[in-house]
Amino acid sequence: MKSHSAWGTSKNLVKFRIPTSDNLVPIRLDIEIDGQRFRDAFTWNPSDPDSEVVVFAKRTVKDLKLPPAFVTQIAQSIQTQLTEFRSYEGQDMYTGERVVPIKLDLRVNHTIIKDHFLWELNNFESDPEEFARIFCKDMGIEDPEVGPAIAIAIREQLYEIAVQSVTSAKESRISKKGRRAGEFFSASKTGGNAVDLVKLFGNKSSVIRKRKEWDAYEPLVDLLSNEEVDALKAREERNIR
Amino acid sequence: MATDAKSPSTPNPEPSAGKLITDAPTPTITIDLPPPSDSKANPGTASATATLTATPTSAAAAATVTVRTHPEPLSSDSDIIHIPSYSRWFSWNSVHECEVRFVPEFFDGRYPSKNPRVYKYYRNAVIRRFRENPSKKITFTEVRKTIVGDVGSVRRIFDFLEAWGLINYTGSSKPQLKWEEKESKSATATLQGGDAAGGSGTNVTVSKSKPCSNCKGVCSFACFASDKRDVTLCARCYVRGNYRDSSEFKRVEISEEAKTDWTDKETLQLLEAIMHYGDDWKKVAEHVGGRSERECVTHFVNLPFGEQFDGPPESAELDSGLSSQNLSRPTKRTCISPLNDSSNPIMAQAYFLSTLVGVDVAEVAARAALAAASALGDGKLKECLKLSSGAPKQQETDIASNSDDPNSMEEALAEARLQLEKEDEELEEAISGIAVQTKEFEDYIIQFEEFDLQMERKRQQLQQLQNLLFVDQITLSFHKTPVPPKAGESVGDGVKSD
């Protein structure tokens, strides 16, 4: 490929998958029946048979003592997300040296986490779960539910980016038929995310971050009291509605 | 005992064993050994006793361990965790072979992310979580929210651990839904693993035909009867209906085998069914009626099988039904042979009779029958019958000498002779009928042949006439020579069309 783009020198087409060591799908559930709200997020292995979906839904409903109407809803929601994921699976996406910023901004029970870091998209060995585990250990987070939440947040963002790269690959293929010279337009769409490593790590600058950027990239973990939690919850629900 | 030797009285580093986030497993695990007290084994020793099953130390321990078939009541000391004896292989740091068997996805290398290390992490995390609060049952959803990983695998590990009593093993005496699963799982484990020395960790027995008033199903497990409300519930409905708190319900367990023995009729049915259906125990159970599959199997296995081989070889040779009727009915009876072939009534009867008379008599009768059958082929019918009747006469005298009742013998003799003669006559009639019919057929055939001949002749005549006609037409056309070619063609056409 003779184009020069923000993606660096190599650009190869790979079959779609989440660019982590295990190809897990992040699933988010947000179901409301009769005023009862069920929100959840977890990772699912898409190679599990579909019968697992119903089993899981039933188990969850039983464990949480939800009304049984939730079972079908949960199962459906999981299925749609899975099929969406699978619809991308046959297609190609671009990989290359892409480093993307990932933002964490979540509240799990009483803990607030805010973080901002860079993640390499091309590294198919990357492991958000491992990252989450180490994060919790380093930050001394006691709530065991935080780890999975972090992993899921990272995965979701990676998923989004992967999806974007699939669509961009499609578009660029279409555009090639129109014999455009370069793929700058597609690069600009998704390349906004990517950080230009060449610029950053050119001969003049060093690998170490500049001091003024430290605050932006520092992880922030906060424990809230009950009232603050309630206040935040109320605000979130207002935003959603 | 390894535990006694190695456990120095180091005080437990953590005050309450439950709260931990670090990776080091808490040293509060015990396996239920006979002197329970509060022997706190270090994780090292726990693994040592678990993995070294063949060493003499643990053999000594095993000797003293009574195989617990029912769970122990949970002590109030939260530092002791009880697990069933069939799970004593568990250790924090290693993976046992039955884990490899039951959760193979982590060990077959198909997914790079699913490896034993990850498996251990999931498993230890689940168990740790449970042991933080061992008196409370932990649900899958609680656990999976705290584990970083895909929920499908976590669920499978959770089910596996629960089935083996490593989590949610509260040891209460009330029956719970999980018992069924545990029983079936431990039953399969005994079949496969050989580690489940504890067998089914329950003392649930089966009661027969107690319908539950709630779900109208048969209570196969313990039922709960309430005299106050006059209601019988199966274990499932009891649990589901949240009756646990009410004290009205009494637990009723009925031991099945002690109450109802297998009657002869049932045994017969069972064996018939086995003959028909072979290994399909479901159908066998249906055929017997009123017995579950398991009971059928256990009873079948326990049956004495000496009686099986009394009759069949002899009866197989009795191919002539005639001789079977010659065996008179003695009054003494031997045991009923179970393997009646009820599909062929004659054979069944022959079989039955042959078993009644005893081995020697049946042998002689069989030989006589064989001789009769081979002689039949030559066409010496009557002689054969006499032969065969001669043999049973011999046997009848034998029987008469053995039997207690000579009068009935003579009657039976006369009856048999009468029947013989009747059969003779019938045979003759049948044969003559056949002869007549064959004659008729021959006549018909002769007639048809004649007709055929006539037809041939007629056809030949017709052919000759046709030829003559053809000749006439040609001569006619020659006489009309000055005729123009058109007419000649038309005449020619006319000739051709004939």
Image (tube, rainbow, N blue to C red):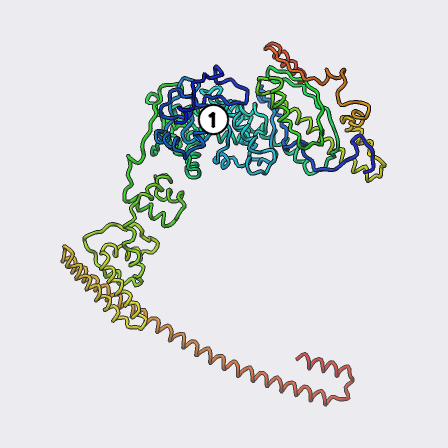
Q: Which residue is drawn at 59% across and 38% down?
A: B110
Judge whether residue B241 can be spotted in this image. no
Q: Residue at x 69, y 87 (%)?
A: B474
Mark 1 surroundings: few (<14), some (14-19) or many (≥20) residues within 10 A? some
Q: Residue B411: x, y in percent? A: 17, 59
User: A78 or B194: nearer the eye?
Assistant: B194
* Residue at disc 1, secondary structure: helix
Judge whether residue B64 can be spotted in this image. yes
For this view, does B317 lie left or right of residue B94?
left
Q: Where B322 falls versus B63 (above or below)?
A: below
Q: In which quarter of the image is the C terminus of chain A?
A: top right
Q: Residue B28: x, y in percent? A: 45, 21
- Return the residue found at the far right: A181
For this view, does B241 lie left or right of residue B371?
right
> Where, by quadrant of the figure, is residue B121 drawn?
top right
Q: Residue B195: x, y in percent? A: 42, 35
Residue occupied by mark 1: B44
- The chain holding disc 1 is B
Q: Residue B310: x, y in percent? A: 27, 54
User: B447 or A25: nearer the eye?
Assistant: A25
Amino acid type assigned to the residue bearing label 1 in the image: Gly
Q: Tag count in the figure?
A: 1
Q: In which quarter of the image is the N terminus of chain A?
A: top right
Q: Where B427 falls versus A77 (above or below)?
A: below
